[in-house]
Amino acid sequence: EGRPTDSHTMRGRPSAAAFLCLTLFGGALGQRYGSGGDSGGGGNDTNSDGGGGGSCFAATERVQLQGGTTVAMPELRVGDRVQVMRADGTFGYDDVVFVPHLKNDVRSVFIEIKTASGRGLTLTPDHLIMAMPCGEESPDARALKRARDIVVGECVVSVSGEDEVVSLAKTQGHGVYSVVTAERSGYIVVNQIVSSSFAFYHELPNHYYHFHRSMHNVLPREVVESELVVAANSFVGKLAVAVLHLFEVFG
């Protein structure tokens, strides 16, 4: 689970229309498994099903840019180079290729994780974070877990190695954000802690976003960041969730 394969490759140069169509489809994946949630620019809807749905970090969380400065999630833009973890466990920097949420004040439930080193991370309960039993030296011991399933006494993976979780709290706040980078592993470093860009399941939405990665150097940033693309993800995603719920009820 912690090491998705790079089996999906793109050939040729997809058109802008194809990008928009697949972005619409991506809304369905994002709402169910990945960077979903209400992406509006000022709504007060709760991004929660009682436990907090979607894949989001709180607006307070920060990522490190190449060069050493840090920025809050709401300030990230397509093209920024942010810290990531490669599939082989090494760290580097790569371009942001998609920001699923416009600036917003969406109200959501979050899990607030505190570690022995003084690090902290606040994210929605179903967002995936890299964890492992403390003291395990093998990289194979690392696995992605939902924030709600993290327990005190186990370790999360940080830029300096394992970091023991010392406290967990459920909180509420305003503003939900996520980011997808060109790094094909789908792992991003937020507040010096390794997380997925997604929730519930990692590989399905991560493979979908390989298309965005292939388009990063083709389409202008203004197209990728447009309200149309972001709103399409949100609208189609909500529709997809409704359909999936019907299948769960009647299937």
Image (tube, rainbow, N blue to C red):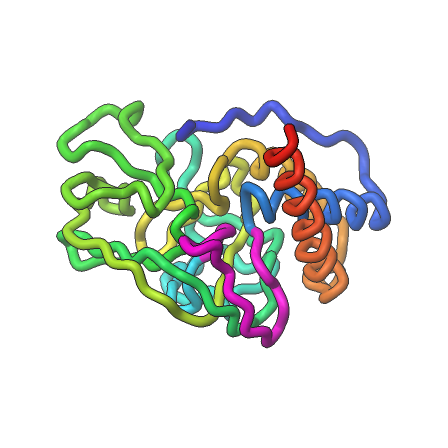
The location of residue 167, given as percent across then percent down, is 17, 54
Residue found at x 45% / y 71%? 174
Residue found at x 27% / y 46%? 158
Q: Residue furthest front?
A: 250
Q: Is residue 154 left or right of residue 100?
A: left
Most common SS among magenta residues: loop
- Residue 90 versus residue 122 in the image, above or below: above
The location of residue 141, given as percent across then percent down, is 27, 26
Q: Is residue 48 left or right of residue 237?
A: left
Q: Is residue 238 left or right of residue 20?
A: left
The location of residue 64, given as percent across then percent down, is 39, 59
Q: Is residue 195 left or right of residue 107?
A: left
Residue found at x 56% / y 27%? 6
Q: Quadrant of the N terminus?
A: top left
Specify whether residue 62 is in view: yes
Q: Quadrant of the C terminus?
A: top right
Residue 51 covered by magenta stretch? yes
Q: Which residues are magenta?
A: 36-56
Residue 246 covered by magenta stretch? no
Task: Count up the numbered dots.
Answer: 0
Nearest the viewer among 178 and 160 is 178
Specify whether residue 224 is in view: no
Nearest the viewer among 200 and 78 is 200
Q: Tell me which corner region of the image, top left, top right, bottom left or bottom right, holds residue 161.
A: top left
The location of residue 63, given as percent across then percent down, is 40, 59
Q: Tell me which corner region of the image, top left, top right, bottom left or bottom right, holds residue 190.
A: bottom left
Residue found at x 30% / y 23%? 140
